Amino acid sequence: MKNKEKILKLVKKKGMVTASDLEKTGVYRNLIYEMCDEGLLVRQSRGLYSASGAEFSEHLSLIEISKRSPDSVICLISALAVHSITTQLPHEVWIAVKRGSWIPKYDSPPVNVTVISGTAFDFGIEKRLVNGVEIKVYSVAKTVADCFKFRNKVGLDVAVEALKEVIRSRKASVDEIMKAADICRVGSVIRPYLEAVI
């Protein structure tokens, strides 16, 4: 019973945990399965558990991928959704991984992986709590710059709309956008669109 209480305390604190998170506390998988059978834990996906009755938002897929790939960063279309810059709910999770790092295979949910190098990968990473679970997501300015950098992937119309919405809602300043654009090496691409918007 003591182990079950310890597990529940950890799960409630973190929101969602992996089987390996639980095993680090000295708990065997059999106890995890038993707690699922008793309705104390809910298996959200393979190796990912939450407390019974926990409320999760439309960002459940982001939480799942963030837990499975702690070195990745939510980017592009998914980051637009996190920052409420788009009304669309992406049908896949968009993540960035650093060039040269291991890219995991995902069965579900669908994942779109973008490889980014060096400073451009590290710049603009924010940590956010989503349903009590910490995820890494690019800042608003970095997301806009990435949309222009990867415009062949997301579409130029998406990048331009994101830029317009960010300027309209003042979620990032022109200086912040240009700093991110310069780091992503798309300053000359964004500038004419920015001048047309402001």
Image (cartoon, rainbow, N blue to C red):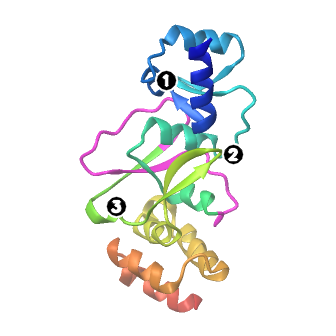
> Is 165 drawn above or below residue 130 in the view shown?
below
Structural distance between the alpha carbons of marks 2 and 1: 25 Å
Q: Amino acid at mark 3?
A: Asp
- At 30% from the left and 39% from the top, the residue drawn is 102
Residue reaching furthest to the left? 100
Asked if the stretch drawn in magenta spans residue 70, the answer is no
Q: Earlier in the sequence, mark 1 or mark 3?
A: 1
Quadrant of image for the C terminus: bottom right
| Element type where label 1 sits in the image | helix
- Residue pointed to by mark 2: 58
Q: Nearer the viewer, residue 150 or 118?
A: 118
Q: Amino acid at mark 2?
A: Glu
- Residue pointed to by mark 3: 122
Asked if the stretch drawn in magenta spans residue 108, the answer is yes
Residue reaching furthest to the front? 2
| Element type where label 3 sits in the image | helix
Q: Which residues are magenta?
A: 84-111
Structural distance between the alpha carbons of marks 2 and 3: 26 Å
- Residue pointed to by mark 1: 22
Quadrant of image for the N terminus: top right
Q: Nearer the viewer, mark 2 or mark 1?
A: 1
Q: Earlier in the sequence, mark 2 or mark 1?
A: 1
Residue 13 at x, y percent in the picture: 60, 37
Q: Earlier in the sequence, mark 2 or mark 3?
A: 2
Structural distance between the alpha carbons of marks 1 and 3: 29 Å
User: Is 121 displayed left or right of 163 in the figure?
Assistant: left
